[in-house]
Amino acid sequence: MIYADNAATTKLDLDAYELMIPFLLDEYGNASSQYSFAGFAKKAIINSRNSIASGINSDPDEIFFTSGGTESDNWAIKGSALIRKDKGKHIITSSIEHHAVLESCAFLEFLGFDITYLPVDKEGYVKPEVLKKSIRPETVLVSIMFANNEIGTIQKIKELTSVTHLNGSLFHCDAVQAVGHLPIDVKQLGIDLLSASAHKFNGPKGVGFLFIKKGTKVLNWASGGKQELGYRAGTENVAGIVGMAKALTNNIRDLQKNEDYLNKLTDEFVFRLSKYNVDFIINGGLHRLPGNVNLSFRNCEGEVLLHRLDLHKMFVSTGSACTSGKAMLSHVIQAIGTPGEYAYGTIRISFGKDNSRQDVILLAETIAKIVESLKK
Ligand code: PLP
């Protein structure tokens, strides 16, 4: 098989898997318990928090474990906006955010907040000057993603946080696609809240974290016990947390090597595909997630292409995995204004470090053949 959908999820890191096993079998003590049997789990959580914090240059007590990207986004947006509702009820986000952000904003809209959805240019960039014009004294939160999950465009985060802070507003960043793939320094970038998800960087599914800058007020997300400083109660997913920390450490160690390799793979793929007689355009900006190639084929159906590739055991996505199944243009492809005759023929390929040169050559050839046959 050729798995080229690493933006949807990634294969578990082997070191992470091995570190997780004891916590699933023998070391099953509840980390909140007082006796020594819980000590190993407690220590593992502390170590994991430390290594995750150093991976994004935060302090350990700024890392809060969650169930993944969706929960982190919901908590960051609802928790920071609702606690500030007396200061203002205006939120700014972009039109190409993940649904976890868009739906959290829609929920707040229902509660009386006013949401501005910033447009993006045709490469998917949010312009800092457009953000500047949209900020009002009552803007309490700006939420803009680090890198887009469909087209891979990486935003100019530092410029966006600077503009946001001029007004004293908070900046939340959905960095689910970026953590473990791009260098991230929350202090240098000026990020107040940052969402991440382990399964996007070779960690296990169902675990993630929210970075909350010290001193930033947010509502507690889950009430109950004292876990996560009382902000997110619930017995910790120790194996998940340990696996996430190890996967992140390994990915950060290999960041440059992986980026160089994935850039080579995508260049080769595009080079090969362009040798065939197929009419396509590449969506997204030049500054893109490593391994991401979002393509639109003229007069073609992305869904049909995906299913034909599936027959060859080649796995790609149309738009984002979360919206596939709905026969409609993705909101991202609409926002960047991909021309109509191409837009419906969009697929997202996201290569990972386990893909080989042979994979990209074979995938390019197979796609070209299918597109050619669909024309006939
Ligand atoms: N944000 C972005 C940008 C994503 O790509 C995803 C997953 O596709 C999420 C949030 C949701 O993350 P999770 O699958 O961990 O809930």
Image: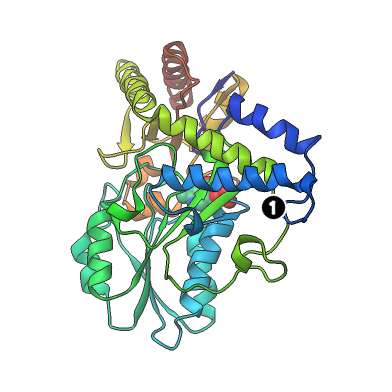
**Which residue is outermost to the front?**
36
The N terminus: image quadrant: top right
Position of residue 311 measured from the top left corner of the image (x, y, whole percent): 62, 22
Position of residue 104 measured from the top left corner of the image (x, y, whole percent): 52, 67
Q: Give 39 or 151, whichever is nearer the viewer.
A: 39
Q: Give 39 or 146, whichever is nearer the viewer.
A: 39
Q: Give 52 or 134, whichever is nearer the viewer.
A: 52
In the depicted structure, whether residue 272 falls above or below residue 218: above
Kind of residue at badge 1: Glu
Question: Mark 1 = which residue?
Answer: 236
Q: Give 96 or 80, whichever is nearer the viewer.
A: 80
In the depicted structure, whether residue 140 falls above or below residue 296: below
- Residue depicted at 45% across the width and 22% down the height: 367
Determine if residue 7 is in view.
yes
Locate residue 71: give its quadrant. Answer: bottom right
- Residue depicted at 35% across the width and 53% down the height: 186
- Residue depicted at 66% across the width and 68% down the height: 222
**Which residue is outermost to the bottom?**
86
- Residue depicted at 41% across the width and 82% down the height: 89
Estimate how packed mark 1 is, as few (under 14), some (14 to 19) or many (20 or more) residues with alpha carbons within 10 Å: many
Relative horizontal placement of residue 288, taking residue 32 as reference (left or right): left
Position of residue 215 measured from the top left corner of the image (x, y, whole percent): 42, 70
> Which secondary structure lies at badge 1?
loop
Position of residue 363 measured from the top left corner of the image (x, y, whole percent): 46, 19
Determine if residue 326 is in view.
no
Relative horizontal placement of residue 28, taking residue 2 as reference (left or right): right
